[in-house]
Image (tube, rainbow, N blue to C red):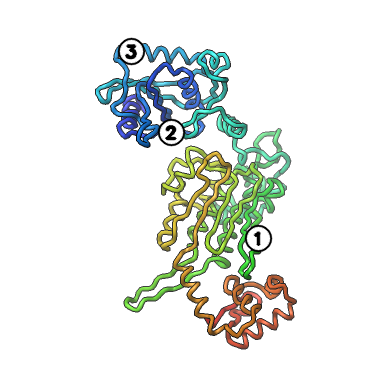
Amino acid sequence: MNLVDLQQSARSILEDRQIESDYIEYKKSSKQYDKIVKTICAYANNYMNRDYGFLFIGVEEENTNGLKAIPKRPISGIEEGHIEIIENEIKSLFKHIQPKPTCHFISDKIDDRYYLAIIVEPSSRITEVTEKGARTVGLPRGGRYIRISRDTILPSQKQEYELLKKFSNYSFCSDLHETATLDDLSYEYMKEYLVQTGAADDIKRLSKLEMAKALDLVGNTSLTGNRVKNFALLMFADDPSKYIPESYVEVIREVNDGTTRMQAVRFDGPIWIQAQKVTKYFEEEIMRSYTVRYDDKMEHDIIYNWPLSTFEELATNCILHKQYDNYQYIGIYIYKDRMEFINHNKPIPPLTTKDLNEKEYFADRQYANPKIKKMFFALDLIESYGSGIRRAKEALEKNNSPKMKFLPEDNEMDYTLVVVPINEKFINIRNSEAINQTGILKDLSEIELQILHILEFEPKISITELSNTISKPYSTTKRYLKKLTDSQIIERENGNRKGAWLIKKK
């Protein structure tokens, strides 16, 4: 961005009265040396991955009538003859910041008064206020200041680790695993990946080693030998969790037997296979729908408890954006009234949970696992970058479902939770059906009603699984099922091995 564009950007911030943020700061006086020094240091460290940081001198914050942290208009301003003096004063503070920051000084006029905008470029090296400099300007201590929201702070241990990773361009997924070698990758999965992505035939005929080199899965020096990268294990090991702990997805769902018990299903294997299998599981075992017909028109509506596209996008996002050096599995919880997706890491800045709730598209989204992103894109598991959340929201809107909610609102918490409420019309129809069944099923025993409730939500359950769920012997469970079948309340579709239970009387 050239100086003219920077000047216009600074002016737009004031004209729009934008609130202070991780890249905007207002100061009435140039004498607040301590705050100016640490803010410039924080902008240079660019913890929130912004293009620039804007520090305004001669602009006071509004602090009345419930308005805070927006520029007070008209601005307090500075004398035209003082602009060069103030600029030189601030430049003299740069000796307290190492390495020296790159800043643009732009003076302009608004409300018929002058202001000075100090626009800080992100540094290519980690930046800190020296201890001597901190004492000189009145800061309690020096250090590697960062900017989060409106606060300029010294980083926590976790934040400093993230800062170090950022400046070293470290990516866990692209790093070599300590012990795993080419032998720990599945040649069959590698070939299947090439088939599914439409690779050229000559690549599909390569040896395992040459194929691994073509996919950038192994180290390329004599010192690394055939050691493989972490993302290679995630994509092509039979069991990635053997090498990278907790690299799996677990779906935990309420058991529909009238109790509060939960049932867990774990999805292992290469993470792209996990994404496919967990979506298939949702489609077959969890997703339900009602067809609503109307007396006055030919059209009908299909109402889903949760749309398939919403689940697929959110589950795939969890897998794609997980920080795999944080050894905690991805949890998907299915309750009667909501789904919850939890990843034990927060979005990478500048993205926040507030953005995820309010925006539809994220063109500048940062990826913890760029290699995996490219492979997921090739597999059609994701479409255009940054558009998955939009598609999930659109599917909910089309289904007339409540909006999903990203939590926590405090971006310092190191997890991301997505809550997706069930469709309210679906609930109403299901409850209405339950009422309508009362007359038909009133003569059934409590255990028979419990069996029907389970079959409604798990039609493919086996007799063994059903007997374990209701805590009855296999033979007793089989007898209950025969009675319900003979009474024409249920029937078995498509045989015993791959069939499903259908409730006929509702």
* Residue located 53% across and 26% down the image: 145
Disc number for residue 21: 2
Is residue 169 visible to the viewer in this orientation of the structure?
A: no
Which image quarter holds the N terminus? top left
* Residue located 57% across and 13% down the image: 132
* Residue located 38% across and 31% down the image: 63
- How would you rate the neighbour count of disc 2 (Cα within 10 Å): few for under 14, some for 14-19, many for 20 or more? some
Nearest the eye: 435 or 110: 435
Q: Is residue 465 left or right of residue 253?
A: right
- Corner quadrant of residue 480: bottom right
- How would you rate the neighbour count of disc 1 (Cα within 10 Å): few for under 14, some for 14-19, many for 20 or more? some
On screen, residue 2 above or below 233: above
Label located before the other in sequence (2 or 1): 2
Inter-mark Cα distance, 2 to 3? 27 Å
- How would you rate the neighbour count of disc 3 (Cα within 10 Å): few for under 14, some for 14-19, many for 20 or more? few
Give coordinates of residue 360: x percent, y percent.
41, 49
On screen, residue 213 above or below 425: above
Nearest the eye: 293 or 450: 450
Q: Is residue 74 left or right of residue 309?
A: left
Label located before the other in sequence (1 or 3): 3
Inter-mark Cα distance, 1 to 3? 68 Å
Query: Is mark 2 in CB contact (under 8 Å) with mark 3?
Result: no
Q: Which residue is mark 1?
A: 264
Q: Which residue is mark 3?
A: 82
Nearest the eye: 434 or 334: 434
Considering the numbered disc 1 on the image, is that residue within a helix, a strand or a loop? strand
